[in-house]
Amino acid sequence: MPQFPENSARNKRFLIGFSAFALLMVGAGYASVPLYNIFCKVTGYGGTTQTADAGANEVLDRMMTIRFDATIARGLDWEFRPLQLEQKLRVGENGLARYRAVNRSDKPITGMASYNITPQKAGAYFVKMECFCFTEQTLQPGESVDMPVIYYIAPEIAEEARLNDIKTITLSYTFFEKEGAKPLKSARVDVGSGKTLH
């Protein structure tokens, strides 16, 4: 086995250590996305909402104003807007809001919506029972679709003194074109159930 001078041995140890560190950082990068998503889901950080299959167990007297916002990502030739600008409801009370999307182009386009809640600290208490976010919606040229959001503000918000100042929450959606999607069928939304039907 060849003998390495002292400097060469030191360089070899450094190279091995650096390579191990680089591999560790790459692994941490891959793991950080799902871990960050779990953290956001649990804490509501970044405006991440909660989901539920049923409404709240109680309705409080505390009133909230929910505002609705809609934007389109660059390059998507759709019209997208909320059908109501705001709703007032009590904490724990179910709300039903609708958004409308219209394909203004001359070709089928598949879009997908992401969402955001402001103020972000309210995200953990905004609960959606039905939502069109992260669901592919394919619209034919000139076609429109109404998409419901069924939601409530969790009564647990009243237990957080730091949230006593929140009287208004804004739910924002951004629609963007789903690259690589094959727009074969149109999405239909059953407004009664809020389910997306293909």
Image (cartoon, helix red, strand yellow):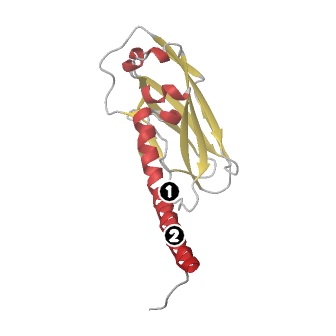
Q: Position of residue 138 (x, y in %)?
A: 53, 52
3D distance between C-alphas at marks 1 and 2: 15 Å
Up-down relation of residue 17 to residue 83 (above or below)? below
Q: Tag on residue 196? A: none
Q: Amino acid at mark 1?
A: Gly
Q: Position of residue 89 (x, y in %)?
A: 47, 15
Q: Is residue 129 left or right of residue 25?
A: left
Q: Which residue is mark 1?
A: 29
Residue that extends furthest to the bottom in the rendered view of this protein: 1
**How many discs appear?**
2
Residue that extends furthest to the left in the rendered view of this protein: 57
Up-down relation of residue 193 to residue 17 (above or below)? above
Tell me the crowding category of disc 2: few under 14, some 14 to 19, or many 20 or more residues within 10 angstroms, Cα based. Answer: few
Earlier in the chain: of badge 1 and badge 2, it is 2
Q: Amino acid at mark 2?
A: Ser
Q: Which residue is mark 2?
A: 19
